[in-house]
Amino acid sequence: MTISKAAQLVIQAGSMAKGGEVFVLDMGKSVRIIDLARTMVQLSGLTVRDDAHPDGDIAIEEVGLRPGEKLYEELIIGNDPQSTVHNRIMMAHERHLTQTDLDKLLVQIRKCRNSDEAVGFLKIMVPESEHERDNVKVEKAS
């Protein structure tokens, strides 16, 4: 997908927003970076220098991942996005805590005396780790 098409999707998603929604954009199929690099060289009217073409104009060198880089983007938002009026824009369906429950959990986190207990409360606060909710009891704030 071109930058301008991606920008149009973002703008269209923004126009659908009412407040707080998370949109998931269908950017098309994945493209291998090596294929993208080869295409860019060819579209520039040049040739790729490699073992098969030692007289090419530009060599492409693979250097691997640098610290902090990822091979894939992973969505940690709910697995059931809702469709919208645009076929390439979905709206994530996220579960969340009420403000009252969040306030109660924050009080309890401040009272934690060990990291395991604190991590347990943090897992409650992250809706994607729902299976952890059964292991920690939420007390009423006093």
Image: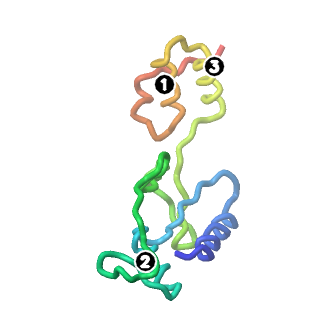
Query: Disc 2 vs disc 3: which is toward the camera?
Result: 2
Q: Find numbered disc 1 in the image and state the secondary structure of the residue it sits on.
A: helix
Given residues 130 and 59, the one toward you in this image is: 59
**Pointer 2 with pointer 3, Cβ within 8 A:** no
The furthest residue to the bottom: 45
Residue 60 point in image, percent of width and height: 42, 70
The furthest residue to the left: 52
The image quarter in which residue 133 lies: top left
Vertical placement of residue 122 versus 71, above or below: above
The image quarter in which residue 72 lies: bottom left
Q: Which badge, 2 or 3, is on the more N-terminal residue? A: 2
Q: Could you say which disc has been placed on residue 119 in the image? A: 1
The image quarter in which residue 103 lies: top right
Q: Is residue 134 left or right of residue 102?
A: left
Query: Disc 2 vs disc 1: which is toward the camera?
Result: 2
Residue sitting at x 62%, y 24%: 106
Q: Which badge, 1 or 3, is on the more N-terminal residue? A: 3
How many neighbours does mark 2 have within 10 angstroms: few (below 14), some (14-19), or many (20 or more)? some
For badge 1, the amino acid type reads Val
Residue sitting at x 65%, y 29%: 100
Q: Find numbered disc 2 in the image and state the secondary structure of the residue it sits on.
A: helix
Vertical placement of residue 4 versus 15, above or below: below
Q: Is residue 30 visible?
A: no
For badge 2, the amino acid type reads Arg
The residue indicated by pointer 2 is 38
The residue indicated by pointer 3 is 107
Query: Marks 1 and 3, Cα distance to the nearest angstrom?
Result: 14 Å
Residue sitting at x 66%, y 13%: 142
For badge 3, the amino acid type reads Val
Residue 134 point in image, percent of width and height: 41, 27
**By what rule are the colours in the image chosen?**
rainbow
